[in-house]
Amino acid sequence: MNELFGSSRLMRGLVSSAAWTCYLFLLLPSLIVIPISFGNPGQIEFPPRQFTLQLYRQFFTDPAWWGSTVQSLFVASITTLVALALAVPAAYALARSRLPGRAGLQGLFMMPMLVPVIVLGLGLYLQFSNWGLLDTTAGIVLAHIMLTTPYIMVSVMSGLHHSDVALETVASIMGASRITIFFKVVLPQLKASIAVGALFAFLMSLDEVVVAYFLTGTNSMTLPVKMYSSIRWELTPVLAAVSTLLTVLSLLIALGIIAMQSKTEASA
Amino acid sequence: MANSSSASDLSSGTALLLLAPLTTVMLLILLYPLGMTVWTSVYDGQFSFNAYADLATSTLFMKVLRNTFEIAIGGTLVSLLFGYPVALHLAAQAPRRRTAYLIMVMLPFWTSILVKSFALVAVFGNQGLINQLLGLLSGGTVNLPMMFNRVGVILGMINFLLPFMILSILGSLLSLDRRLILAAETMGAGPLRIFWKITLPLSMPGVIAGVLINITLSIGMYITPALLGGRQDMMVANLVDFYTRQTLDWTAASATAVVLLLLSGVLVALLGQVRGSRGLAGAGA
C-alpha cells in the first residue's frame, strides 16, 4: 500500500529485479577480489582451484609493494594530523566569529572538492617542478593536506552547528579564557566530528591516485600509484591480495565513521 | 556594530589568527598552482591566446571533447536508468531494511576506484571470468570485447557514479508525501499513472541534482578511461596527462586544464542553483 507506484505486483517485480541487478553489480568488484586473492599465485583465476596465502606473502615481501604501502600509510598519517591542525581552528573561527568575508574564505576552503583533480594535479606539478618538490614525500603530503581539509571542515562545521553555544557563553561569562574555552568546552563536544573528519581524510589520502600520479616517482611512490601502473601494465594476481586488504581497511574505516556519526547525531 | 555580538563570539583578531594558517596553505597550494596553470596557458615567452586557438583547431582535442561529452552523458543516462529503480526499491522498504540495503550501495562508495577497476578487468576483460566461462560453455576460446572500449568505460563509470545518483534520488523520494499516492490509488489510478503523474514529477529535483553530480564527476574522470577504455576513449583529463607527460607541452596541457575547469565550474554553478549552497559535498575522486 505504501509503495511509490501503488500496489502493483508487476511494477514491484520489475523494480526489485532491476534493483537487485544493481546491488550485485555494485558489490561484484568488492567481493570478487577476495577469492582470487587466496588462489593461484601464477594467474588471476576464478573460481580458485587451490587455497594458498602465496599472494599475501608476495605482497609483504616485495619491497616495491610493501615499500609503497608504508609510504602511503606514512603520508596519510602526516596528512591527517596536519590537516586537522589547520582545519579545526579555521572551522571554529568561521562558525564563531563575525569577520567580514567569511563566506569568501569558506568558498576558498571548499574549493578542492569542486575543482577536477586532474587540474589540481597539473597545477601542483607545474609549481612543484619550480620548487623542487616533485617526487618528494613533503610534496605529496602538502598536496594531500590541501585535498583533505575540506572534508574535515565539513564534518567539524556540522559538529559546531550541533554543539551547544550556551556552554561557551557561560564559560566566557565565568571568566574562562578563549584558550581554556576552546580546549575544555569546545573540543570535547567535537570529538566525534573530528574523528569522522580524520578518518575520512586518512582514507582519502590513502586512496588518492590522480594527484599522486603527477607528483610522485620512484622515490616517493604511493600504493595507489603502484596499483595504477600495475593494473595498466602487468595485471599481476598480487593485485587481488592488495585489493582485498584495501577493501577490508576501507570497510573498517567506513564502519568507524558510521559509528562516530551516529554518536554525533545521538548527542545532538 | 549593527550585528548583535554575544559573549561566545570570537574577536576579529582571534578569528584571523585561527584562519591564517589554512588560508596561507590554500593560497600557496591551491590558488597559486591554479593561477600558474592559467598563466602557463597564455604566457609562453610572450602573452598570447595561441594555445586556445590551437586547441580549437586540433582534431585530437575536438575528438577528445566529443568523447568526453558522449561518455559523460552516456554514463549518466545509464546510471539514471538503473539508479532510479534502486532508489524506488530503497524508498519502498521499511527503515530498518532500507539501512541494510543501503550498505550494499555504500560499500562500493568506500571501495578504492583502483580495486574496482582491477576487479572489472578481472571479470569483464579479454581473459576475464566472463570470457573464460563462455569459453568453457562453448568449448572454445571466446573473446567477447567488454573492456578496453566504450562499454568498459561506461561499466567502470556507472560502478562509480551509481551511489551518487541513487542517494540523490532517494532523498527526493523519501520526502515525497505518501498520502498523494494513497489518494490517487483510492481514486482508481493505476500504477503506471501514479508513477508518471506523481512519483516521477515530484522526484525531479533529486533526478536533476543526481544527473548534474554525475556529469560533473564524469567529465573530469581520469582513471576509468585510462584503465578500462581503449585508445579511442581518451577523455579531457587523459589529454591533460598526455600533453604533460608524452609531448611535454605544458602550454597545451594548461589550456586543456583551463577548459576543463571552466566546464566543471559551469556545472557546479548549475548544481548550486538546484541544491542551494550544499553543492558537491561528499563527492571525491
Image (cartoon, rainbow, N blue to C red):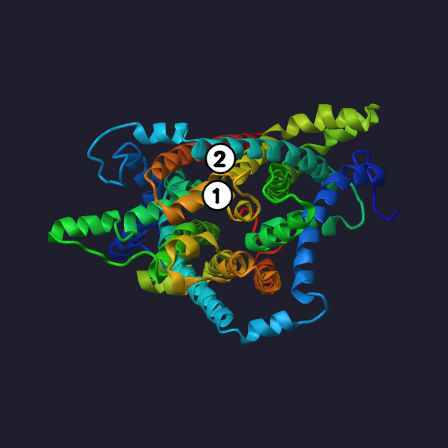
For disc 1, the chain is A
Residue B199 sits above or below residue A226 on the image? below
Q: Secondary structure at mark 1?
A: helix
Percent coordinates x, y for residue A264 in the rendering? 57, 32
Q: Which mark is residue A42?
A: none
Residue A122 sits above or below residue A97 on the image? below
Q: Where on the picture, by quarter, is residue B74? A: bottom left
> Do tags 1 and 2 sit on the same chain?
yes
Binning the other alpha carbons within 10 Å of mark 2 as few (below 14), some (14 to 19) or many (20 upward) gives many
Foreground pick, A149 / A91: A149
Could one spot residue A107 in this view of the protein? no
Percent coordinates x, y for residue B133 in the rendering? 18, 48
Q: Which mark is residue A225?
A: 1
- Give me the C-alpha separation between circle 1 and circle 2: 9 Å
Residue drawn where x is 80% and y is 45% of the image: A99
Foreground pick, A15 / A114: A114
Percent coordinates x, y for residue A214 in the rendering? 55, 49
Binning the other alpha carbons within 10 Å of mark 1 as few (below 14), some (14 to 19) or many (20 upward) gives many
Q: Where on the picture, by quarter, is residue A60? A: top left
Residue drawn where x is 46% and y is 49% of the image: B167
Residue drawn where x is 44% and y is 64% of the image: B73
Q: Does A36 sit left or right of A137 as displayed?
A: left
Return the residue at label 2. Answer: A68
